[in-house]
Image (cartoon, rainbow, N blue to C red):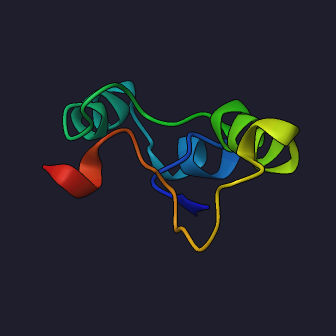
Amino acid sequence: IAPGVVLTERVKHLMKDAKDIDKLAQTHLLDIGMPEHMADMAVYLASDESVITTGQVLSVDSGVSIR
């Protein structure tokens, strides 16, 4: 799992102002990632649904890497 920016408490603390978070969100295709998004990907990879997923680096970055 290759996460992009994840809106954790630490990131919120570094982004002193709500305007900073809004500005960061504009660089993302969907929205800023939440810790739950990373957990969801980990659960998917641990599940039977991903049984044939091998050798991949999965970007969970809301499209930042494709912009």
Residue 38 in the image: state x and y as whole percent: 67, 44
Q: Is residue 41 left or right of residue 47?
A: left
Q: Is residue 54 above or below residue 29?
A: below
Identify the residue at the far left of this view. Answer: 67
Residue 2 in the image: state x and y as whole percent: 53, 64
Q: Residue at x 78, y 50 (%)?
A: 51
| 58, 62: nearer the viewer | 58
User: How many numbered discs?
Assistant: 0
Q: Quadrant of residue 43?
A: top right
Identify the residue at the far bottom of this view. Answer: 55
Q: Residue at x 28, y 40 (%)?
A: 24
Q: Residue at x 64, y 34 (%)?
A: 37
Residue 27 in the image: state x and y as whole percent: 20, 41
Q: Is residue 52 left or right of residue 29?
A: right
| 28, 41: nearer the viewer | 41
Q: Quadrant of residue 56?
A: bottom right
Q: Residue at x 65, y 43 (%)?
A: 8
Q: Is residue 56 above or below residue 3?
A: below
Q: Quadrant of residue 7?
A: top right
| 7, 31: nearer the viewer | 31
In the picture, the quarter occupied by the N terminus is: bottom right
Q: Is residue 2 left or right of residue 16?
A: right
